[in-house]
Image (spheres, rainbow, N blue to C red):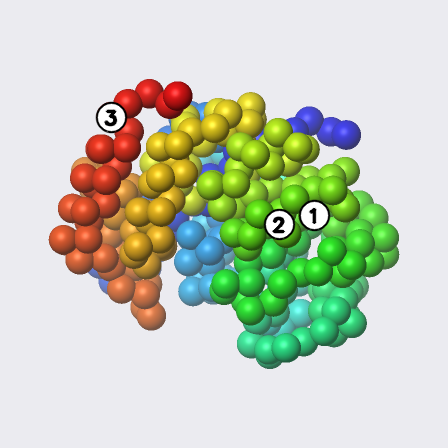
């Protein structure tokens, strides 16, 4: 097996007052996260509001990251769309520029779809990509997509597309599923999105994480993602984040850490967290992280 995946920050996306991506701020934050211990940067994922970012914007961000000196080998591109042609188009630019991986979510508009239909959708994306298709991480996040990637479907896809389907990011928050996934497909790159289960998964074969909390707690997350080290502080703060809309809550924590309130802006239909909620999050973080991990 190649070197372990480790920790990737699910990079949050800053917007300026007009609603456009604040690209210089975003590239600077990516560099900060890499310097704090992240091995790579995942762009346009759930935490990055990827479903609200258009194809042309994605190209501009990737180009800016590369121009800023961030190697393509440290970039993962999230793709969260329903049309197979759109998924291929968004993947194509990243792959052509040498991105490490594509984080590819299943289509989410149509509900109660079966494995055969999902297999056909993924196959259509890979066919559209042709020889460019490689290094795809399937994205299991049923709380958002309403689609749970079955172990059988993952097995079919990896068998049909070797070298294309190389791993799974599991953000389902269901430990029984994560454990079964690792047992069935532990030779793939299995990444954990729910930080509460991260250390435990790494100890039984997980290769790391793509983590939203790494935007403001990269050092703590790295110890969990690379060494399987439990950290009750991180696990406790996940529970605090889940009391609020998670994406704007993560941005609120980045704003708090950096002192830059531009991070508070989210793109509609999301709304920023209120001042009182930000204060509650900050107080919880200070309380939990006042001590060293046991």
Answer yes or no: do the residues labelled 1 and 2 have beta carbons within 8 Å? Answer: yes
Q: Nearer the viewer, residue 13 or 171?
A: 171
Residue marked by disc 3? 290
Residue marked by disc 1? 180
Q: Nearer the viewer, residue 82 or 284?
A: 284
Where the C terminus falls, by quadrant?
top left
Q: Under tag 1, what secondary structure? A: helix
Provide residue 34's location: percent of width, then percent of height: 45, 30
Q: How far, Cα to Cα, is label 2 from label 3?
A: 32 Å
Residue occupying image coordinates x 47% and y 41%: 195
Residue marked by disc 2? 176
Provide residue 292's location: percent of width, then percent of height: 33, 20
Q: Is residue 274 left or right of residue 26?
A: left
Label 1: how many Cα within 10 Å (few below 14, some 14–19, many 20+): few
Rendered view: 56 above or below 286: below
Quarter where residue 82 is shown: bottom right
Rendered view: 273 above or below 218: below
Residue occupying image coordinates x 62% and y 49%: 176
Q: Nearer the viewer, residue 280 or 161?
A: 280
Q: Residue 188: tell me if it is visible.
A: no
């Amino acid at each position: 097996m190649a070197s372990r995946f480790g920790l990737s920050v699910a990079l949050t996306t800053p917007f300026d007052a007009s609603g456009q991506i604040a690209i210089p701020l975003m590239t600077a934050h990516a560099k900060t996260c890499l310097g704090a211990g992240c091995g790579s940067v995942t762009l346009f994922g759930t935490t990055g509001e990827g479903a609200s970012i258009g194809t042309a914007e994605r190209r501009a961000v990737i180009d800016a990251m590369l121009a800023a000196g961030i190697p393509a080998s440290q970039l993962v591109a999230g793709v969260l769309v329903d049309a197979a042609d759109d998924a291929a188009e968004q993947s194509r630019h990243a792959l052509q520029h040498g991105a490490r991986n594509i984080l590819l979510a299943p289509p989410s508009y149509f509900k109660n779809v079966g494995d055969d239909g999902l297999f056909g959708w993924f196959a259509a994306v890979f066919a559209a990509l042709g020889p460019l298709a490689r290094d795809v991480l399937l994205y299991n996040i049923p709380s958002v997509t309403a689609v749970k990637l079955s172990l059988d479907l993952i097995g079919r896809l990896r068998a049909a597309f070797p070298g294309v389907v190389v791993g799974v990011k599991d953000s389902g928050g269901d430990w029984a599923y994560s454990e079964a996934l690792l047992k069935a497909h532990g030779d793939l790159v299995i990444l954990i999105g729910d930080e509460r289960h991260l250390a435990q998964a790494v100890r039984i074969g997980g290769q790391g994480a793509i983590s939203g909390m790494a935007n403001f707690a990269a050092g703590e997350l790295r110890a969990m993602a690379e060494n399987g080290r439990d950290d009750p502080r991180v696990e406790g703060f996940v529970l605090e984040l889940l009391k609020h809309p998670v994406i704007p809550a993560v941005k609120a924590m980045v704003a708090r850490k950096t002192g830059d309130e531009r991070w508070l802006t989210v793109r509609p239909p999301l709304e920023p967290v209120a001042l009182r909620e930000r204060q509650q999050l900050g107080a919880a973080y200070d309380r939990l992280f006042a001590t060293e991990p046991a």
